[in-house]
Amino acid sequence: MKRSDLLELLTLAAVWGASFLFMRVGAPEFGAIPLAGLRVIGATLVLMPLLALRGQTASLRTHWRPILIVGVTNSALPFMCFSYAALTISAGLSSIFNAATPLFGAAIAWLWLRDKLTPLRTLGLVIGFLGVFGLAYSKASVKADVDGARVALATLACIVAALSYGFSANFTKRHLTGVPPMAVAAGSQLGAAMVLAVPTFVLWPSAMPSAAAWTNLALLATVCTGVAYVLFFRLIAHIGPANAITVTFLIPAFAMAWGALFLGESLTPQMVIGCIVILAGTSLATGFLPRPRPAQAGASS
């Protein structure tokens, strides 16, 4: 990996980590669904002109049905879930659950696409899911005045979001292989915007959100969604999807750092332990930490 690629990878992790901060600030004023709706609308305004400039709008028209499904499962549903969770739990905790996305993706690939699981990858799935559910049970970093039902629903929302991301990755692999990535990115945001347009209007907050909330929304939509997609697909082109997906492992560190720096969020021992267990299991389950090759005869020690 070139130094410039590594810099882009770290930048993308920082940007996506900041998205949890912006949701934490914006969700109380906009509400979960309007925030998600405006996020995808803003991202659409960023990505669709880029798609037109590349002359790839024909791909969007040809594959609009599967792209719409990706828009729902990779944007509309998880964005709503994480925005809802941001009303209750910390940005850092949400990002840790998000880091389990490749874990759910590997499980779905095994169940649906019949991907083979080695004993080491199976062990990774077990470890990773134990980390997810152990962290969920511990209810780490939750406000003391929030009742248990809201905490449980927020945690469940994060798990549903990660599950949705995992499904979307496998659906994309099965139905959109060979389609230009920018067409999938822009089209999925457009599809999500169409799905959420009416709910966003119906559930619009009675009090106009503050200027600070609008600023957070603008950054969430343009930088953390629109620009982030461009960076992500640049990385896929330069270093390949296997290396690009390692950004998932870096996001929690940035999200927890932003939350501590700007919101005064605390980092609990349960969060640290849960994060380590989830990332370790995910690394094994996705093959990011492959089984060491046997040493060749005569090799120097």
Image (cartoon, rainbow, N blue to C red):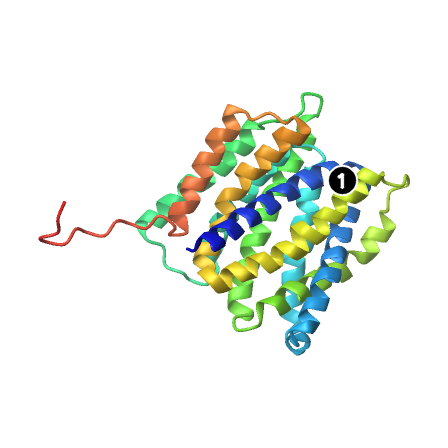
Name which residue lies at 60% across and 38% down: 94
Which residue does the image show at 86% across and 46% down from the upper left?
204
Number of residue marks: 1
Nearest the viewer among 20 and 46 is 46
Residue 143 in the image, given as x and y percentages of width and height: 67, 24
Farthest residue, direction front: 3
Residue 126 x %, y %: 41, 42
From the viewer's perspective, is residue 195 above or below residue 145? Answer: below
Quarter of the picture holding the N terminus: bottom left
Give neighbour class at mark 1: few <14, some 14-19, many 20+ (Cα, 10 Å). Answer: many
Q: Which residue is under mark 1?
A: 26
| Front residue of this view, candidates 64 and 211 | 211
**Would residue 283 be visible to someone looking at this image?**
yes
Q: Is residue 3 above or below residue 91?
A: below
User: Relative to residue 213, is residue 75 drawn left or right?
Assistant: left
Q: Tell me where residue 50 sits by quadrant.
A: bottom right
